[in-house]
Structures are given as structure tokens and as C-alpha cells.
Amino acid sequence: MGKPFAARVGANENVFGPSPLALKAMAESLKDIWMYGESENHDLRAALALHHGCAPENIMVGEGIDGLLGYLVRLLVEEGDAVVTSDGAYPTFNYHVAGFGGVLHKLPYRDDHEDLPALLEKARETGAKLVYFANPDNPMATWSKGADVLKALERLPEGCLLVLDEAYIEFAPEGTAAPIEIEDPRVIRMRTFSKAYGLAGARVGYALGAAPLIMAFNKIRNHFGMNRTSQIGALEALKDQSYLGDTLANVSAARQKIAEIASENGLSSLPSAANFVAIDCGQDGAFAKAVLDGLIKRGVFVRMPFVAPQNRCIRVSCGTPADLDSLAAALPEALAEARTS
Amino acid sequence: MGKPFAARVGANENVFGPSPLALKAMAESLKDIWMYGESENHDLRAALALHHGCAPENIMVGEGIDGLLGYLVRLLVEEGDAVVTSDGAYPTFNYHVAGFGGVLHKLPYRDDHEDLPALLEKARETGAKLVYFANPDNPMATWSKGADVLKALERLPEGCLLVLDEAYIEFAPEGTAAPIEIEDPRVIRMRTFSKAYGLAGARVGYALGAAPLIMAFNKIRNHFGMNRTSQIGALEALKDQSYLGDTLANVSAARQKIAEIASENGLSSLPSAANFVAIDCGQDGAFAKAVLDGLIKRGVFVRMPFVAPQNRCIRVSCGTPADLDSLAAALPEALAEARTS
């Protein structure tokens, strides 16, 4: 619309930003930006290994989860191979699968949750190479217990890998991260510095998994693909777990505030384990879209699920108090407008 | 070796760094690093279009030339397809070709130049999909006239694309850039902010070519792969052509100094159109390797070509005066050592 949004609460970015220590290190590192980054991401992987209690060989750093998903699909999916995901789950995964000629099988959500047992059953039925499952989910912010995910894995068919996308895991309740043995060959986990660590613009994600799978990325990845400043910023952000704690508190407060705003407008919202909240607009997708349009028109950038019945909701990222004041001001008008249109 | 090199003149990085205006803009942009970069690289492509006198649709920005070469190979090369390059030319191109199942045909250099007519003849003979040609060349820093490149294209077989890697073009004499019509479907040109613009650590490259080919990258690329700060830094670096002029002067002086150092040691060096110089060590590859090892041992990081007879040379990047003083101090010792070993 030619002007910045009053509230940018649509892309699940983390407005609370990265640790000041990360910002400081990145600023200081700019003078060395004429040098290539280190191709093995050695220091960051060493720190992540310490953080997760595994070896650097269990960690692959890449250009965001998007980049890593592309590499993973390339490694495992050939023309015509079956791949299973949920209808309405992360579209970039589907993009990569389609791009490498895989055949997607999409299952509906169950009660606004990605339905892992059904996904695994479908994987068995189709001989899938790959199953995608996000925990917490995007766009609904629902979650499964980590122990349940581990248990469900017993039904993973031979020759199939589970991609467990944990981009939002830091925001989730204790026990949501699945207690998976690092060398378990059935699962690869995706993590990111884009969400809780506030570094979306820096493009740093990492995969956690069994060393043979993780090291296979080295056969195909862009070895000098990582930004030097981003490597440094991610390392410092990881070290500052105290700031991460502050962020989680800020996000938690914002989630509560969004739920209150929904409630004040007679709407319910879904419990959230992520840095966004799905507000149930109470009618169909066309109505939610009208509400969304009304918000955007009023400078509040939000998004919405694109598959029914999840598309009865709008998805609001955890903004600053000022962002959420904008939401609180715009939502009644947007709702009224949607109801009369 | 556990300590930083006294002179980092091995990776063809640009020690003179990016424009101070680019550094300033990048530093200021860090506060917004919590936001994703813009997925279309709109502003940078618009500025590049203006700079090159073409449309934004003729420009694809990506994660360095390495990233773009990967996308290009994926777009054009299928299992078993022939691809032609020079033996000893850019290995990352070969890596991508092998990674997508292409069959590489490598031709020797001719008089230390990549031999474009021979490459095109080989392409005809093998039915190649892709021919790689760098101008200026790396690792020899030799070059062809742009008009000759254009003329040679007449022999490009139908169904074959020339990848013209112009990573070092800004350092080359007037007339080295081939005068190719932007919509010429026979060529895609690769450019970068890693060399003359001093932003290697930021990972920004771009491809120039006919709109249908350039837009095809959108079907497969990592749409949110670009670092937000890098997008901003590249844009500001491009705008500061005055600083680029200073860099070219600095690089030219360094090239001359490296040639002098070689000469003072009784060695010849090749004329260079890039930001590095190939010093002919005057014997075989084993001898040049001994010289290189001697330099590295003395804290001077250099590299060398890995195919005979080019591997009679060592490759020295244009460093600061202090870097080149280190080279001048270390080279006589390294040579003496190599001669007695």
C-alpha cells in the first residue's frame, strides 16, 4: 500500500529481536565482511553441540530451515517418490517436494492439530520417503507432547524419515520437544535462529540428527552459503540464554494479550505454543478473510490459514504492546465491517 | 595452525572492503534483523537494472554465484547430460554438475587461458547443455576480449547455454565484459558483490540474462534465502561507484607490487585482469607446492592452481601493503627452502 504497516504481526517474526550481545558482535564483525564465512560453521556447530549434548557431526547449519528442507528433499526424494504432510502445513516444504518431483499426499488436520498417527499410516500406505510434521504447528500454534511424538514413531514405516520441524519449539511448554536419541535414524529435527532468537533476516537454521544423514548434506549443500555476520550473530544469540528467557516472557505476555483482545471482541482463540495466536473468527474462511482484509486496510498486517476449517481463523504474531494496541483498535472495526459486507 | 595468518591473500577476497556507506547502512539495518529479507530482492534488482540498462526481470539475485550456479545446474542439467568446462577452472561449478548427475567434459587451458572456441567445439561434439567459461579466469587471472567472446558465441550449438562467469569483471580492462544483448538466450552472466564490492561474507551474487531464463529461477530458488542486511549492503555498495574506483586503484597497485615481488625473486608473473596474480614459480607443481607450503608456514596464506601446467604457479590475492610486505619477506625464504628440499 506504499506505507509501512502500523503493526507487522503477520510473518511470525520476533519483534523482540536478538540478544543485544548478538547485535553488538554482528556490528563489530561488519568490518570483516570482506572475508568469506567459514565453510564448516565450525564454531556455531561446536556451540550447538554443547547446547544439545551431541557431537558437531549431528548438526548441519544452513540458510534457514527453508534452505535445509530443500537440501533434505534433494537428498531423499526422487521423481515420483511419495511424501506425506498435512493440508495447510508449511508450504515451503511442499514447494521443495514438488520442485524435486515428489508426489505429495496431504492429510487434513484433526481438531486443529497435525495428525501424526494418520500421517504415519499414510506414509505406510504410500511407501513415503518423507513425512513432514511440525511441532508446534504453524499456522495453528497447536502442539503435541514430545513423548507422544516419540511413541508415534514406532509406527513409522521402514525406509521413511520423519522431518520434525521444531522452528517454534523454544516457545512451547516443557515436554514438547520430543526426547529423541540424537543417533535415531528415523527422525531429523529442524531448528532455527529466526524465531525465538530473533534473527529471521540473518538466515540461520540447523538440522539435528544422526551423523550419517547430517553429514550427507555436505555432498550437496552450498558450502560457502552462510553469511559471516550471521554465523557470529547466531553464536552470540545462542550463548545469551538469559535474553532468550526475557523473550519467552515477552512472547507469553503477548499471547495472553492477543487472547484477551479476541475475547473482548467475542472471539475465541486457540491455546498457543508458538509466537503467534490463531484467533477463531467464528464463521467460515470468507468471513475470516474479510476480517483480515479489514485489519490490513487499517495497517495491521496479519495472515491466515489457507485450508478449511482452519481458515476460519486469522493468525496474529506476538507483537509489541504498541502493535497489539493497534490490533485492539482495528479489530472491532474490521469485525463490524466484515459482518455487514 | 591455531593462529591467524599474517597475510590472508589466498581466497581472492577484497581486503579493501566494501564502501563505508555500505558498512554504515548495514550497521544501521542490524536493528531490523528480526525481520525477514524481502523475497524478491526488489530494491537491489531495480538498482542493478538501472546500472546495467536492463529490466529487473533480467536479474536474479542469489546467495553468491555459488548458490546461483547450483540453481542454474538444477534448472538445466539432468542425469547424464553433458557439461563442458576447463580442467582446473572453478571447482564449485563442477561440484554442482556432479551433484545433479551431469557428465563433465574438461578441456585443458591453452596458453594459460580458458579456451572458449575449443570448449564450444566440445559442446557441439558432446551435445552439452551447459558450457562454463570465466572471464577473467580464476586461477590464472587471464582474460579474453569481450568482443571475442561474443564472436565465439556464433559457434555455440543449439540447445546449449554459455555460463559466463564474470565474478572478477570489474577489475578487468575496458572491453573485457562481453557486449551481449540482455535478451540473448545463448548466455547467462554471473556477477558478484564478493569481489570488487568487498562483500564476500555477505553472500550476494546475481545472474544477468534473458528474462525467461532468469524468471525460471523463481520455480526452484530459496525465496527467503537472502540475508536482509546483505540486501541493504549490496544496494549501498552498488550506489557508491566512487569507492569502487578507489578499490580498483588499490587493486591495480597491489597487482603491480605482487609482480615486482615476483620479479625481485627472479620469477615471472602473469598479467592479471582480476584481484589476484599468478606467480610462475618456474618449475613443476611439486615445486610450486613447496613454495606455497613455505609461505603458509610463514603466515602468508596463498593458494595454487591444481592442474598442470598451471600448477607451476601460486595464486596471490591483492592484499594491503602490509600483506604484501609479509609476502616480500616470506617469499625468498620459501623459495630457498623449496629449492633445497
Image: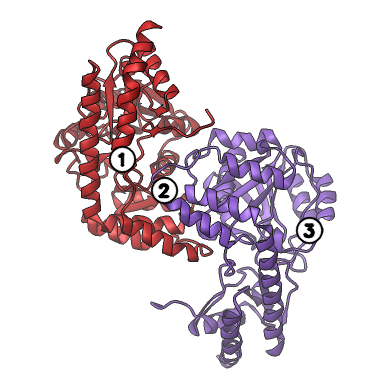
Chain colours: A red, B purple
Question: Quick one: A336 or A304, which is closer to the camera?
Answer: A336
Question: Quick one: SS at disc 1?
Answer: loop
Give x and y (percent) for residue B15. 57, 70
Which residue is label 2 attached to?
A: B33
Question: Quick one: SS at disc 3?
Answer: loop
Check whether the beta carbons of the residues at disc 3 and disc 2 lie within 8 A of each other. Answer: no
To which chain does the residue with label 1 belong? A
The answer to which image quadrant residue A150 occupies is top left
Question: Quick one: B188 or A32, which is closer to the camera?
Answer: A32
Which residue is label 1 attached to?
A: A167
Can you say whether A35 is above or below A205 in the image? below
Q: Residue at x 71, y 72 (%)?
A: B252
Which residue is label 3 attached to?
A: B176
To which chain does the residue with label 2 belong? B
Question: Quick one: A285 or A23, which is closer to the camera?
Answer: A23
Q: Residue at x 21, y 37 (%)?
A: A253
Question: Quarter holding the C terminus of chain B?
Answer: bottom right
Question: Quick one: B2 or B193, which is closer to the camera?
Answer: B193
Q: Residues within 10 Å of mark 2 (few under 14, many from 20)?
A: many
Looking at the rendered structure, the kind of residue marked 3 is Thr
Give x and y (percent) for residue A261. 24, 24
Give x and y (percent) for residue B179. 81, 49
Give x and y (percent) for residue A146. 17, 37
Alpha carbon distance from label 3 to label 2: 38 Å
Camera-side mark, 1 or 2: 2
Looking at the rendered structure, the kind of residue marked 2 is Ile
Are labels 1 and 3 assigned to the same chain?
A: no
The reply, left or right, for residue B265 in relation to residue A268 is right
Looking at the rendered structure, the kind of residue marked 1 is Ala
